[in-house]
Amino acid sequence: AGSVGEMSPDDAADVLDELDEDHSDVLLSKLESEDAEEIRNLMAFDPETAGGVMNTEILILSQDLTADEAILHLRGEIGDKEIPYYAYIVDDDDILLGVISLRTLLLSPPGTRLGEEIQDQDLITVRFDADRAEVGQLFSHYNFMALPVTDYEGRLLGVISHDDAIDIIQDLAGEDMLGMVGAGQDETVDTPWVDSVRMRLPWLVVNMINSALSASVVWLFDGSIAQMAVLAVFMPMVANQAGNTGQQALAVMIRQLAIGRFERKKAWWAVLREGKIGLSNGLLLGILVWAAVYIFTGSLGLALVMV
């Protein structure tokens, strides 16, 4: 209980979510009532959403304070906060009005009202039920140190810090990588082996069917291969080149999915781009292979077939 009490509320909620309900209730009962209530509120959010990863230890100020009054107020609170990068300006109903960095606050002339500092501010927030992918995309795009989380009425609920965002982005990238090779996106070494078989087997079957189709094409030309055995030497080269080309395109697409979502127009542009790259590389490699095969075999026809 002592270790849980020393954690930030979001980290403590994550730890307790991994325990059974009885065990987590025992630990929460040993904490101060205010801390326990805060952690229980965080545990009520879906851990796969913004609310599930937000931190409630935030610096909140009234818009009626002056800059020097705000600085005095923050001096008494900042020691208990995990992420003292920004202060959040709210009204009497906890509606988020603006965000001010501590640097801006320190540079503000004495007597300046906070409401004046946040005039015409374009607020970037995320709703509590937004999925983790949206959170990661916002952090990647804006490079924030923290992102405020609100409800549907605009009330401030908490903030997501940059360290939590890094964890989210890494998790999403790992899921994409597992999905790329046909493993379960939530699979770990602790996943029951039966579940791993269930997640992997369908993709292995699809891959086997594709391989069978490729093999059938080779079988149709077995007579030609038998008459010209050198074709069997070049077949692995062609297959490997096709596989490497596909992996290059796939790696670029997976990386794009990890750092941001595809809009429909951008997705088609990406497909067209990869098509142009494939055609260009194919043409250049085809010329190189044609020359190499012609020099090696002396057969112009075979060289053209390899192209």
Image (cartoon, rainbow, N blue to C red):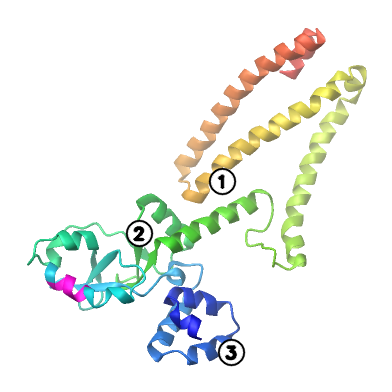
Query: Picture coordinates of residue 149 (x, y %)?
Result: 36, 68
Q: Pick whichever of labels 2 and 1 is earlier in the sequence.
A: 2
Residue marked by disc 3 = 22
Please name the residue shown 17% across and 62% down the image. Answer: 106
Q: How many residues crowd mark 1 within 10 Å: few (<14), some (14–19), many (20+)?
A: some
Label 1: state its secondary structure.
helix
Is 36 left or right of 255, judged from the image as shown?
A: left
Viewer-proximal residue among 74 and 91 = 74
- Residue type, label 2: Met
Label 2: state its secondary structure.
loop
Residue marked by disc 2 = 145
Viewer-proximal residue among 101 and 169 = 101
Quarter of the image with the C terminus is top right
* Res. 254 mark: 1
Q: CA distance from mark 2 to mark 3?
A: 36 Å
Is 267 left or right of 182, judged from the image as shown?
A: left
Please name the residue shown 79% across and 13% down the image. Answer: 302
- Residue type, label 3: Asp
Q: How many residues crowd mark 2 within 10 Å: few (<14), some (14–19), many (20+)?
A: some
Q: Nearer the viewer, mark 2 or mark 1?
A: 2
Q: CA distance from mark 2 to mark 1?
A: 25 Å
Rendered view: 138 above or below 61: above
Is residue 41 inside the magenta stretch? Answer: no
Q: Quadrant of residue 154?
A: bottom left
The stretch in magenta equals 69-74
Query: Picture coordinates of residue 269 (x, y %)?
Result: 48, 35
Q: Nearer the viewer, mark 2 or mark 3?
A: 2
Cβ atoms under marks 2 and 1 closer than 8 Å: no
Rendered view: 297 above or below 243: above
Res 101 visible: no
Q: Quadrant of residue 306?
A: top right
